[in-house]
Image: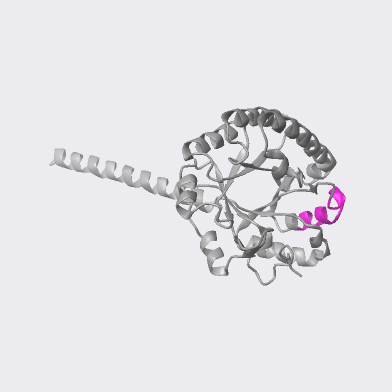
Amino acid sequence: MATYITKFTGKQIRRCCLTAFFLIFLTSCEQKADGQDLSIFYQPLNQDRGISLQQWKEFGKEISGIGIKNVVIQWTQYGNEALGESHGWLAQRMEALQDDNIKLWVGLYSDPNYFREIHTNATEQKVYLTEYFNKLHKSYVQWKTWLRIHSSKVQGLYLPLELSDYDFKTPEQREQLAQILKQQVKLYNEPLMISLYLSGQLPQSQIKQWTDQLTNLGLIVYVQDGAGTQALSTDERHAYLDDLGCNVGIIREIFVQDKATKSFKADRVSKEKFDSILNEETCHPNAMFSLRYLPSNSNPLKLVGEK
C-alpha cells in the first residue's frame, strides 16, 4: 500500500508539474499576444494643418480607444516642406497625440524623388544614399531638442526609406546598403525603424535573409503586407510573409488601391474588414497603414485629392 501510494503521488506530482508548465506557457503566449503594441502610420500633408487641435485630441482618444498604442509619423520633412518644423502645426498635433498616451515613432527627412533616384545601379545608389542620409541627419538635428523634451513618449526614429527587392535585387546592392545603414545606426541613440515592400523580384529565402541582415544591424524592420496595393497575388503575399521571423513586423494595409487610375488613388477598407485586420492573430509586431485610411466617422483626415 505504501509503495502504491508513493507511486500514485509521484504521478500526481508529475501531472501537476506538467499542468502548471502548460498553464504558464499558455498564459505567457496570451500575454505576449495581448501585450503587443499596435501601431499605425501617419503621412503628414499640409492639407492637414487646418484640422483643429480639438479635433486631433478627439481623434487621438478614438485611436487610443481601439487599442492603438503608437503612431509612426512617416516624415517630419518632405523635400523642402518642413511642415512647420519642431515648433509648428505638425509638432503641436504630435504633442496632442502624446497627451492621449500614444507614443510616437518620429520619421525624419523624406525625399519626394526617392523612388526615381533609388532605382539604379549600386555605384549610383551609394552616391544618392550618402547625400540622402546627410539630409536626413540634418532634419534630426533640427528636431533634437523636441525629441529630448518629449523623450518619455517617443519610441524611436523612423527612417523614411521604403526598401524593395525591386531596387535592391543583387547581393552587392544589399550588402552595400547594409554597410551604409550600419554607419547610420551609430549616429543615433534612439531605436531606428525601417520598412520594406515586396514586388516578387526575389525568392522567399532571400527576403528572409535580407530581413535577418537588417535586424542584425540593430534596426527594427517592418514589411508591408501588400494587401492594399495588390501587387502580388494573395498566395504569393502569404508565402513571403509566413516565412518571416516573428521579430519582423508586418504593416497591414487598410486601403484598397484603385488600379484603374494612373496616379495613386485608394479608398478606405470597410469597417468590417478593418475589424478583421485588427483582430487577426499573429506573432509579428503589428502596424497599419495608415491613419488617413482609418474607417471612422470622426476621422478628420481627408484622402488625397478629396475635397
Q: What x and y, as percent, mark residue 70? A: 66, 52
Q: What x and y, as percent, mark residue 247? A: 53, 41
- Chief secondary structure of the magenta portion: helix
Query: Vertical placement of 102 versus 11: above or below?
Result: below
- Magenta residues? 82-96
Q: What x and y, as percent, mark residue 231? A: 56, 52
Which residue is nearer to you in this view: 101 or 116?
A: 116
By what rule are the colours in the image chosen? one colour
**Is 85 inside the magenta-drawn segment?**
yes
Q: As drawn, which residue projects farthest toward the left?
A: 1
- The answer to whether 51 appears left or right of 119 in the picture is right
Q: In the image, what residue occupies the spot 78% across and 54% down? A: 95
Query: Vertical placement of 48 versus 172: above or below?
Result: below
Query: Vertical placement of 77 versus 130: above or below?
Result: below
Q: Is residue 188 visible?
A: no
The quadrant of the image that shows the N terminus is top left
Q: Is residue 41 visible?
A: yes
Q: How many marks?
A: 0
**Is 156 inside the magenta-drawn segment?**
no
Q: In the image, what residue occupies the spot 59% across and 44% down? A: 222
Which residue is nearer to you in this view: 143 or 30?
A: 143
Quarter of the image where one finds residue 134? top right
Q: In the image, what residue occupies the spot 77% across and 37% down? A: 132
Q: What x and y, as percent, mark residue 84? A: 86, 52
